[in-house]
Image (tube, rainbow, N blue to C red):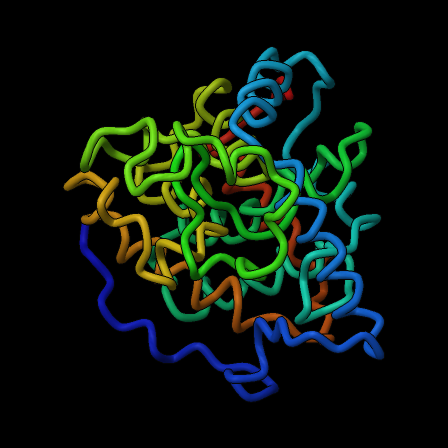
Amino acid sequence: MRIIQDFGSVSTNKSFDLFRNYAVNDEDDIQRRVRRTYHMMHTHQTMEFAKRKAAEWGRFDRFSARVMETLIRLNDLVDESDPDCDVPNIVHAFQTAERIRQDHPDHDWFHLTGLIHDMGKVMAFYDEPQWAVVGDTFPLGVAFAPSIVYRHDSFELNPDLTNSRYNSKYGVYEPNCGLDNVTMSWGHDEYLYRVLRHNSTTLPDEALYMIRYHSFYPWHSGGDYTHLTSEKDNAMLKWVRLFNEFDLYTKSDDTPDIEALKPYYQSLIDKYIPGTLNW
C-alpha cells in the first residue's frame, strides 16, 4: 500500500493555533466544561478502572446495530471535552470524512475511517459519563507524561499517581513492549477498535491504528511514551499523525449535507463493515 507523505493541505476557517486551546478561563463556558471533564477523567481513570471497563464492554452485549444507525445516534451527542466546536458529533464525522475524501480520493478505506473514528462515543448513551468516553487518552500502569492535558494539576486524587508499581518510567511494562501490550485509559478509541475487531472488519491495519490511537495526543503530538512503542507502532505513527490533521483541523460550524452523502458512505460500510454489529 502506498504511504501518503503530503498532509499539509488541510485547511480550516480559523487559525491553526486556535485549536486545542486548553487555557484556564473560568468565564468561558466551553473551557470550564472541558476542564471539568478532564479533571474527572484524570481522577478516576486508573489501571483497575480501565481493565474493568474493557471487560464489561468487551462482552459486546449492550446492543446490536448497523454502522449508519449508530452514527445517527451521535446527532444527540456534543463532546464535553472538545474546546474547538460545540456541534453534534455526527457533523464532525462527516466533516472529517469529506475532507479526507477530497485530499485522498483513491483511499476509500481512509474516507470511512474518518466517518466512523468517533463512533465509540455511543457508550455515552449507556450510562457512561463522558470522562470515560471522550477526550485525550494516555497509558496507565506507568508514569503520567508531562504532555497530558492539564497534567500539572488534575491527577492529585488519582491513586495510581502514588502507586510505586505505576509511577515510574516503565511502570509495569518492558522497554519497547508495544502499545498493543499497554493498558490505555478507557474511552471511545479503544472501544471502537475492539468492536471492529470483534465484528471482523476488513479495514486495514492503518485504519485500525488511526481509530485506536487518534486521541493519544501525548504520543502522536507530544512525543512521549516512545520508550514503550514497538517498531510497528513507530511505522504506524505517520498514519496516526496523518489522520490527526483531518480530525483536528476540519472542525467548524459548517454543516455538510449529510443526507446527500449517506449513499456513498453506506457503500463503504457495506464493503468494510457490513451488516449488524454487536456492540
Between residue 63 and residue 267, name the one nearer to us.
63
Residue 89 in sight from this viewpoint? yes
The image position of residue 7, as x and y in percent, is: 33, 72
Query: Is 219 placed above or below 119 here?
Result: below
Q: Is residue 159 left or right of residue 10?
A: right
- Name which residue lies at 33% across and 58% down: 106
Query: Is 17 placed above or below 173 here?
Result: below
Count up the numbered dots. 0
Between residue 76 and residue 271, name the one nearer to us.
76
Q: Is residue 171 left or right of residue 48?
A: left
- Name which residue lies at 50% across and 68% down: 99
- Name which residue lies at 47% across and 66% down: 246
Between residue 69 and residue 141, name the one nearer to us.
141
Q: Is residue 239 left or right of residue 32?
A: left
Determine the image quadrant of residue 35. Answer: bottom right
The image position of residue 202, as x and y in percent, is: 38, 29
Residue 97 in sight from this viewpoint? no
The image position of residue 181, as x and y in percent, is: 32, 26
| Quadrant of the drawing holding the C terminus | top right
- Name which residue lies at 36% across and 42% down: 209
The image position of residue 245, as x and y in percent, is: 43, 68
